[in-house]
Image (spheres, rainbow, N blue to C red):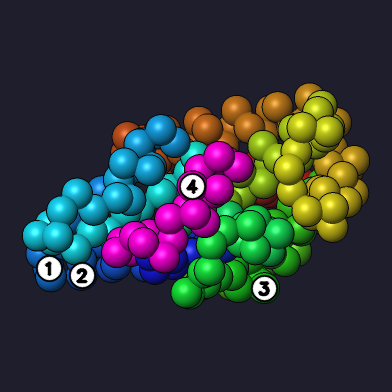
């Protein structure tokens, strides 16, 4: 069995890479199976007969790869003539990767540092700096992608204030989020979550320009 891992915070590029693999497999006439539950993984990995065409199995939820499934994979890895792609819209820990059978290829897609700078700059009394970084980023990155990252960041800031113990991020990431979250009140964060959701709906229903809506939120809520 050949295993390929695609992961990283740059979900735009990582997902495009996944689609490229799937498209190429279909072009070659492979059988492509996208997994929807942990129970279907063993069956999907096994080739039914000597005459079955080559198979690409795609797992897009790493929670499906629990200890039992990973044990099965290790026991059968040498006997399976299948290509497995493990995709995760975030960073997979080295510990998890090492718990898998031999991985043939790991591709990590990292966000540009400027995007991280913008996300970290999003806090009260920092509107000017945040806007400058945003306008620089969108020269090279799709605004919709940056907006989705910001929305997730704000949700994470609220999450870490109300239930930090349930977060599974690396310790360094949790520490950074706590520092940033402490610059907001819970009410400010819930208000921002609502405003960003409203801006998303308005932009998608032609009731407003996303760039203008986001600029307004930053200028008025981070002043």
| Front of the two marks 4 and 3 | 4
Image location of residue 223, percent across then percent down: 78, 47
Q: Is residue 59 above or below residue 163?
A: below
Q: How far apart are marks 3 and 2 (CA)?
A: 31 Å
Of the numbered discs 4 and 3, the one sitting upstream in the chain is 4
Q: Residue 113 carries which label?
A: 3
What residue do we see at 67% from left, 37% from top? Answer: 155
What residue do we see at 33% from left, 51% from top? Answer: 45
Residue 12 visible in the displayed image: no
Image location of residue 78, percent across then percent down: 41, 65
* Residue behind mark 1: 27
| Residue 194 lies in the magenta-colored region | no
| Front of the two marks 3 and 2 | 2
Residue bounds of the magenta highlight: 66-85
Q: Distance between the residues labelled 3 and 1?
A: 36 Å
Q: Is residue 27 above or below residue 32?
A: below
| Front of the two marks 3 and 1 | 1
What residue do we see at 29% from left, 64% from top? Answer: 81
**Is disc 4 placed on a helix, strand or loop?**
helix
Q: Which mark is residue 72?
A: 4
Q: Which mark is residue 24?
A: 2
Badge 4 vs badge 3, beta-carbon distance below 8 Å: no
């Amino acid at each position: 069995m050949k295993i390929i891992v695609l992961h990283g915070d740059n979900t735009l590029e990582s997902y495009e890479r996944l689609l490229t693999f799937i498209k190429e497999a279909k072009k070659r006439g492979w059988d492509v199976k996208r997994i929807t539950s942990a129970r279907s993984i063993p069956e999907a990995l096994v080739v039914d007969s000597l005459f079955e065409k080559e198979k690409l199995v795609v797992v897009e939820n790493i929670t499906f790869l629990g200890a039992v499934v990973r044990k099965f994979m290790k026991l059968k890895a040498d006997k399976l003539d299948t290509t497995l792609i493990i995709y995760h819209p975030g960073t997979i820990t080295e510990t998890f990767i090492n718990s898998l059978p031999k991985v043939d290829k790991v591709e990590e897609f990292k966000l540009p540092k400027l995007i991280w700078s913008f996300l970290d700059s999003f806090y009260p009394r920092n509107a000017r700096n945040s806007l400058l970084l945003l306008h620089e980023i969108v020269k090279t990155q799709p605004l919709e992608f940056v907006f989705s990252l910001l929305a997730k960041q704000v949700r994470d800031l609220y999450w870490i204030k109300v239930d930090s113990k349930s977060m599974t991020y690396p310790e360094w990431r949790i520490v950074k989020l706590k520092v940033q979250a402490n610059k907001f009140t819970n009410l400010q964060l819930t208000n921002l979550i609502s405003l960003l959701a409203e801006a998303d709906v308005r932009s998608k229903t032609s009731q407003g320009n996303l760039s203008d809506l986001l600029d307004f939120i930053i200028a008025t809520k981070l002043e």
